[in-house]
Image (cartoon, grey):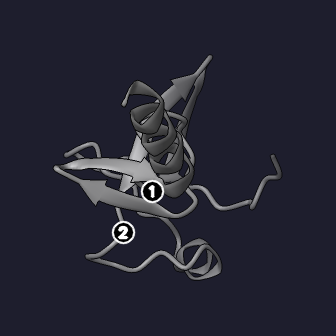
Amino acid sequence: MRSTGIVRQVDNMGRVVIPKEIRRQLKIENGKDSFEIYMDGDKIVLRKFAPACIFCDSLIDTVNLSGHNVCVNCIEKLNGMKEQAE
């Protein structure tokens, strides 16, 4: 992880502004993108939210099925299991 040299204060509501340069570089769109927030030891990590497959956590070729994201690869595996059961 590299330092950008940018320091921001936390406001009274607990908010921190992500600098415009970083938002632009990561293609973060105001009012559109969401973030996952988690801790890694003593660090707070923000990661741009991308809906992952509920079975394998893949972010590639996911589709929404009844409110759950499933990747095409897992759909093919489920179809194979269905054919074996028949």
Q: Which residue appears farthest toward the top when viewing the image?
A: 41
Q: Residues within 10 Å of mark 1 (few under 14, many from 20)?
A: some
| Front-lying residue, 45 or 80 | 80
The percent coordinates of residue 25 (x first, y second) are: 65, 79
Pointer 1 residue:
50
Task: Specify the quadrant of the image occupied by residue 22.
Answer: bottom right
Which residue appears at 48% of the width and 30% of the height? 84
Q: From the viewer's side, name the closer residue of 85 and 44.
A: 85
Q: Amino acid at mark 2?
A: Asp
Q: The C terminus appears in which quarter of the rendering?
A: top left
Report which quarter residue 49 is drawn in. bottom left
Q: Which residue is mark 2?
A: 33
Q: Are marks 2 and 1 in contact (CB under 8 Å)?
A: no
Q: Is residue 68 above or below residue 16?
A: above
Residue situated in front as seen by the camera: 46 or 85: 85
Q: For this rendering, which residue is in front, 32 or 39?
A: 32
Residue 2 image point, x, y percent: 83, 52
Give me the residue at 54% from left, 35% from top: 56
Q: Is residue 6 left or right of residue 44?
A: right
Residue 79 placement (x, y as % from top left): 44, 44
